[in-house]
Every structure is written in C-alpha cells, then in structure tokens.
C-alpha cells in the first residue's frame, strides 16, 4: 500500500494505491473516487470480530466523534486505487506506524492500513469539561495511517515541555505525556482570555498541530446562518 | 482575447484582456473588477425556458454578457468558493459541467442544461449538468483543488466531487457497495464512468462543509 498526498497543503487529497486483495480502512464519507473494480464493504468492527465486538467498537468510535461505520476498500482481480478527502479545507499527513502508538484528535482520522487498529480512548474527565471533545483515537499496530488537519499541519518535535490549545491538536506520539489544564493565571483568564483549555505536553516525541481550530470556525460562521428547527 | 489565471490554486482569479468586439458570457455575480470600456448586458440566455432550466440546475437565472466597446479592456472574474479555476479549450467536442461550477465562456460556446435523471435528485446532491459545446474558451471553478483523471475503462466518483467530464464518457448514478453500505457507509451516491475521456474532480464537497456547520447554527425558539 502506498499513500500519496496530492494538492497540498490547502486542499489535500490522499491517493491510496493498493495491490490486489490489499485493504484500506477509511472514515465514512471520505471517499472521493476509486477504480470501479475496488470493492467497498461497510462494517463497524474488524473482520471476524463478531457482531457484539463490532457494535462496541462502532459505539466507541461514535462517542469520539467519528462515524459508527467504517468502510473497507479492496481491489478485486488487479491492483487499484482509491482517493480520500477530509470534510474541511486543510492538509493530510501520512505516518508510518512501526509498533508504537499514536493518539489522534477525534475527527483527524482519514484512512489506514488494515494492520493499524484505531480505537476510541477517553482523555479524562477534565478534558470533557472543556467541550472541545478531547476524547481521542488511539492507533496501534504497523502500517501507514493518514490523518487530516483544518488549515495547515505543523510538526513539533517536543523535547521538554510544550503547550497547545486543545482545538489545535491533531496527533501526538504516545511517548509524550500530557495534561489538560486551564490556560493562564486563574479563572479570570480562563473566562476572558478566549484561550479556554490547553494541553501541556512533556517528554520527547512528535506532535502535529493544525493552524486553524474547527470549533472556532464553526462558532464564527454558525450564528450567521438561519436558525435551525431543532 | 488573452487570459490568465492568477492566485492558483487556493484563491484563483480569472483575468481576461479583451480586444474590441470580444465577448464573454459569465455567471451572474462573478465579476470582481473591470475597466470601464466594457458593455454589460444581463439576459436570460436561451430564453425563458432555458433560464428556467438553468435555475433548476442550481445556476443563477441570469448570465452576464460583457462586450469590449474598445481595445485593451480588462475583466477579472472569481467563483464563490475558495479553490481553483480550470481553462478548457472547446474545439467542437462536448463537455459536461456540474451546474455550480460554470464560471465563464466565450460567446460561441453553447451552454445547455441537461437533465440527468431522477435518481441523481434522490441523493440530495442534485447532479445537474450543463452541456457545453461549440468552439471557444470555457472556464469552470472547483471547491478545493482540481484533480484530473484520464479515464480508461471504468472509474467511480462520489457525486459531490464531480466538476466536469468529456462527453465521450458514459455514466450511470448508483449507490456504492451493497444494501448495508447504502444506508450506513455515509458515501451516498456515486457516478460510475466508463469509456475513454477526461474527468475533472474537486477535492472538497460543499455539502460536507454545510453538514459541518449545521450544528453551529442557532436553534429557532419554539413557538407556542
């Protein structure tokens, strides 16, 4: 499997080249195009996991803000390709997993090799309080994984300590420990600084941040739209 | 007439340098800036019926025709969404253009609405295509980047990402995967192309942006 990212950075499109019989797992709704001989199957869990296991996995993913079902694409009879794009404008990064773990912001997952297991992970009660939904996805296993950002994506190699606004986190390696906390000196800056919650990373490892915050964009545009019924 | 596309690919702007007598037909609202030696006529091209068909296609009822009354006139045009603009030289063939993607064409390009069948309507992503034929220059816009695919054989595309394709390709709209996928895959309807020809895709889908923004809308107060 080879994942190539075209049209970087603003309107990135992931092109996944697959051998015959090879499978890529993708977020529901992400497919843009494919060779017609690439078949698609929809399921909540993995093959052979059983109905209950699939249901649990799907529910956990849904709580994390991802789709309940995931789609699996496999070329039949010949090699083929599938292309995927995220919902918002922005970039796509590809990371080769080699046995470690990677944490992803809940809406950042785009697609991965079958050998990569993506599971929802609770970020702790304090993160929930922030409303930024820092319920994360934990990717483990081996193979490539592609994740998307809103705006541009920047890599930060943390060595020591680094603070990021929770809405700007895309992904980070498990070797980093993190703590979510209020930003600034006290309650006054929490409510008035507009900064809300931040994530304090420490240790050594790679962190990916996005240059725009989807929730802030939503809050800027949403009130300009006609009110909805419910 | 000379043309160039500036600020590619994120925020493309079409720049036309027109000689006396040159004519260009644009989507209403596309004009960004112009010199004053251009004459503007707004009309319902193709008569009332043609205009009504275009309105069904999601396009504005009106098209603007700009005519250069003297030499060295400049006209700048932009689409509504952030993204790219693609130029297509019409040399007698036919290009199908997704209705919302049409930006401009020279006067000899014939633009007609083609109804593609009820099944496309069902998907909520109304796949209305404009049938462009004749000779001249045509420009269309994309939300996101333009991704070009030279189809040989069979190729499948999500309907929300189709921008334009050559008439030499035949297509049918269907759901992707099996019954379970139809309801649960979130992939909606796809278009299956076959034959040989060029296909232009856009890498973002405006319906998905609307879906993202929906939860951020205010809720209408309940009326008693």
Image: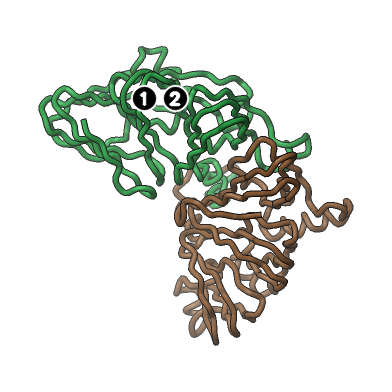
Chain colours: A brown, B green
Give residue B90's mark.
1
In which quarter of the view is residue B111 placed? Answer: top left
- Residue at mark 1 to residue at mark 2: CA–CA distance: 8 Å
User: A21 or B77, which is in the foreground?
Assistant: A21
The residue at the far bottom in this view is A160
Q: Is residue B42 above or below residue A182?
A: above
Chain of the residue under label 1: B
User: A161 or A205, which is in the foreground?
Assistant: A205
In which quarter of the view is residue A37 placed? Answer: top right
Discs 1 and 2 lie in a common subunit: yes
Residue A218: x %, y % from top left: 50, 55
Residue at the location (66% across, 35% down)?
A: A36
Chain of the residue under label 2: B
Residue A127: x %, y % from top left: 64, 72
In which quarter of the view is residue B48 placed? Answer: top left
- At label 1, counting other C-alpha atoms closer than 10 Å, the crowd grade (few under 14, some 14-19, many 20 or more) is some
Residue at the location (59% across, 25% down)?
A: B171
Residue at the location (35% across, 34% down)?
A: B87
Residue A58: x %, y % from top left: 77, 54
Q: Are marks 1 and 2 in contact (CB under 8 Å)?
A: yes
Asked whether residue A86 appears in the rendered view, the answer is no
Label 2 belongs to which residue? B95
Residue at the location (70% across, 66% down)?
A: A139
User: A123 or A86, which is in the foreground?
Assistant: A86
Q: Is residue A75 above or below residue A49?
A: above
């Amino acid at each position: 499997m080879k994942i190539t990212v075209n049209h970087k950075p603003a309107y990135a499109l992931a092109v996944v080249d697959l051998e015959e019989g090879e499978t890529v797992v993708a977020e529901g709704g992400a497919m843009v195009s494919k060779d017609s001989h690439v078949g698609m199957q929809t399921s909540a869990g993995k093959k052979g996991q059983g109905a209950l296991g699939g249901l649990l996995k799907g529910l956990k993913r849904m709580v994390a803000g991802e789709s309940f079902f995931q789609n699996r694409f496999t070329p039949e009879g010949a090699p083929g390709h599938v292309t995927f794009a995220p919902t918002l404008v922005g970039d796509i990064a590809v990371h080769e997993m080699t046995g470690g773990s990677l944490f992803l912001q809940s809406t950042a997952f785009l697609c991965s090799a079958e050998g990569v297991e993506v599971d929802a992970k609770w970020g702790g009660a304090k993160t929930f309080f922030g409303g930024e939904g820092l319920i994360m996805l934990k990717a483990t296993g081996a193979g490539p994984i592609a994740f998307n950002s809103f705006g541009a994506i920047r890599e930060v190699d943390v060595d020591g300590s680094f603070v990021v606004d929770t809405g700007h986190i895309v992904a980070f390696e498990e070797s980093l420990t993190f703590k979510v906390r209020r930003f600034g000196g006290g309650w006054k800056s929490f409510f008035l600084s507009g900064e809300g919650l931040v994530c304090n990373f420490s240790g050594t490892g790679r962190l990916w941040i996005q240059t725009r915050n989807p929730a802030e964009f939503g809050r800027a545009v949403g009130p300009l739209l006609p009110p909805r019924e419910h | 007439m000379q043309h160039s596309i500036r600020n590619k690919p994120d925020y493309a702007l079409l720049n036309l340098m027109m000689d006396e007598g040159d004519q260009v037909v644009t989507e209403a609202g596309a004009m960004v800036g112009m010199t004053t030696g251009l004459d503007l006529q707004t009309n319902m091209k193709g008569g009332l019926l043609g205009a009504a068909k275009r309105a069904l296609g999601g396009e504005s009822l009106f098209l603007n025709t700009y005519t250069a009354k003297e030499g060295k006139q400049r006209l700048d045009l932009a689409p509504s969404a952030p993204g790219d603009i693609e130029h297509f030289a019409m040399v007698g063939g036919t290009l199908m253009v997704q209705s919302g993607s049409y930006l401009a064409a020279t006067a000899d390009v014939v633009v007609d609405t083609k109804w593609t069948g009820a099944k496309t309507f069902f998907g909520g992503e109304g796949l209305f295509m404009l049938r462009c034929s004749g000779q001249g220059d045509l420009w269309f816009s994309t939300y996101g980047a333009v991704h070009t695919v030279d189809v040989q054989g069979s190729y499948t595309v999500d309907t929300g990402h189709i921008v334009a394709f050559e008439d030499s390709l035949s297509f049918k709209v269907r759901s992707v995967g099996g019954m379970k996928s139809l309801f649960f895959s979130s992939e909606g309807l796809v278009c299956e192309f076959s034959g040989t020809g060029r296909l232009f895709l856009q890498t973002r889908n405006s319906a998905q942006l609307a879906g993202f923004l929906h939860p951020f809308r205010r809720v209408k107060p309940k009326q008693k």
